[in-house]
Image (cartoon, rainbow, N blue to C red):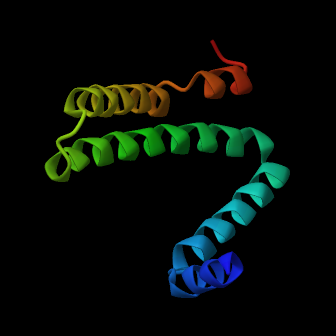
Amino acid sequence: MVANKVDAYVAKTNRGPLALESLAAIAIGILLIVFPKNATQLLVILFGLFWIIYGISLLLSLIRNHKEWGWRLAGGIGSIALGALLATHSLWSALSSGSS
């Protein structure tokens, strides 16, 4: 009974984002093997950009859902600030390049 519901849910869901995520993971893995130093710097910057996008999505979610708006507002602003800091001044980039 439960398996049928799970199969029906999987059949209805969009598999495009999952395929895109899988291809991105494979590409990142290949980059880390071939260019470990540059790929690490790139991943730190991408992680910072992810935090920025996450913070923006938290702020935009306030339009639809007003519950716990204070925490969402603080989380959105904090995520954007930390993501910008990480994307522009990544500690890992400085450590892996050997510069001070």
In the rendered view of the protein, which quadrant contains the N terminus? bottom right
| 39, above or below 28, in the image | above
Name the spot of residue 34 as percent of width and height, x first. Answer: 83, 54
Name which residue lies at 24% across and 41% down.
59
**Above/below status of 49 relative to 70:** below
Relative height, residue 51 to residue 31 (above, below): above
Foreground residue, 24 or 58?
Answer: 58
Closer to the camera, 89 or 63? 63
Residue in view at x 31 percent, y 48 percent: 57
Question: How many numbered circles are shown?
Answer: 0
Residue 36 vs 12, above or below: the answer is above
Q: Is residue 59 left or right of residue 85?
A: left
Furthest residue to the front? 1
Q: Which corner quadrant holds the C terminus?
A: top right
Residue 49 location in percent, x, y? 44, 43
- The single residue placed furthest to the top in the displayed view is 100
The reply, left or right, for residue 42 in relation to residue 34 is left
Identified at 28% across, 29% down, the residue is: 77
Residue 94 lies in what quarter of the image?
top right
In x, y percent, where is residue 23?
67, 70
Residue for point 70% across, 46% down: 39
Left or right of residue 83, residue 7 in this image? right
Residue 35: image x %, image y %?
Answer: 78, 49
**Is residue 39 rendered to the left or right of residue 70?**
right
* Nearer the observer, 93 or 10: 10
